Image: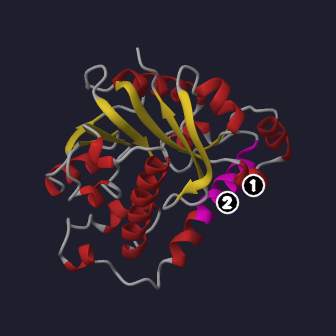
Amino acid sequence: MRNDRSGVVTRAVNRVKHWSVRARDRVRSLPVRASHRGQGPPLPPSRLMHLVAASEDVSWFLDGGKQASSSLRAILAKNGVTMESLGSILDFGCGAGRVLRHWENLQGPTLHGTDYNPTLIAWCQKNLPFVQFQHNELGGGLAYQDESFDLIYALSVFTHLDEPLQYFWIRELSRILRPGGYLFITTHGEHYLPQLASEEQERFRRGEIVVVGSRREGSNDCATFHPESYMRSTLATGLEVVDFVPEGALGNPRQDVFLLRKPQG
């Protein structure tokens, strides 16, 4: 992030983080769920929770993951898709299983998770045995066969990639998606426009992607902002936009949802 605009970049990234902190604070007073009382999958250590959720707060980790899983299920159902009807599901950028833990009792699909952080994957492999995990490189391909999954979801992943990596991963995820399968992506949209510098706001309004902190792609120090028109006309080219839900990614504060489908044939 060290460049001529380092101050602007830092402020923009910190403002994005601020929204996550505010959302986390809103759930501090909620009752701790059963899984924290030993009736569900183990909790990751505090350092891993902080790495994936920018907080060591247990309630935020559990409730944020629960909200994310619920909103994913609800948006799919709105478009006529039930989780139980799917054959295989991949959590791309699964972290410490913040969302996957809430699929423990899901009947039907096989569950898979992948992440570029080997420490997170090692913890998941040990503690979430109902999921099959793999490690991936930030800019390398996935080991899965072509057309392996009915649903792939990437929650707050494309929000931290620069443009070349965006293109790489949309192609790679499309490769392993079955014809007719769904890709569920969350993005930073218009809600974050006031957090950008004036020149970046103009680019966003022209339908251009905006990346700040691009030297730290893959981490929370890189923040990427997607106009709706950019997703439709550029990044999601070749995929059908089934649904667009502004600020619909509960558990990933204020992020938009794009539900994409791979064409048949």
Position in image of residue 246 (x %, y %): 64, 51
Q: Considering depth in this image, is 212 or 25 the residue closer to the camera?
A: 25
Position in image of residue 173 (x %, y %): 41, 28
- In the image, residue 260 sits, relative to residue 244, either above or below, namely above
Q: Residue at x 67, y 47 (%)?
A: 189
Residue at which label 2 appears: 15
Badges 1 and 2: C-beta atoms under 8 Å apart?
yes
Secondary structure at badge 1 equals helix
Position in image of residue 160 (x %, y %): 54, 43
- In the image, residue 251 sits, relative to residue 241, either above or below, namely below
Under mark 2, the amino acid is Arg
Q: Is 140 displayed left or right of 170 in the figure?
A: left
Identify the image quadrant of the N terminus. Answer: top right
Of mark 1 and mark 2, the one earlier in the sequence is 2
Q: Which mark is residue 9?
A: none
In magenta segment, residue 17: yes
Under mark 1, the amino acid is Gln
Q: Considering depth in this image, is 109 or 10 the residue closer to the camera?
A: 109
Identify the image quadrant of the C terminus. Answer: top left
Q: What is the CA distance from the residue labelled 1 to the residue labelled 2?
A: 7 Å
Secondary structure at badge 2 equals helix
Extent of the magenta region: 5-19
Residue at which label 1 appears: 195
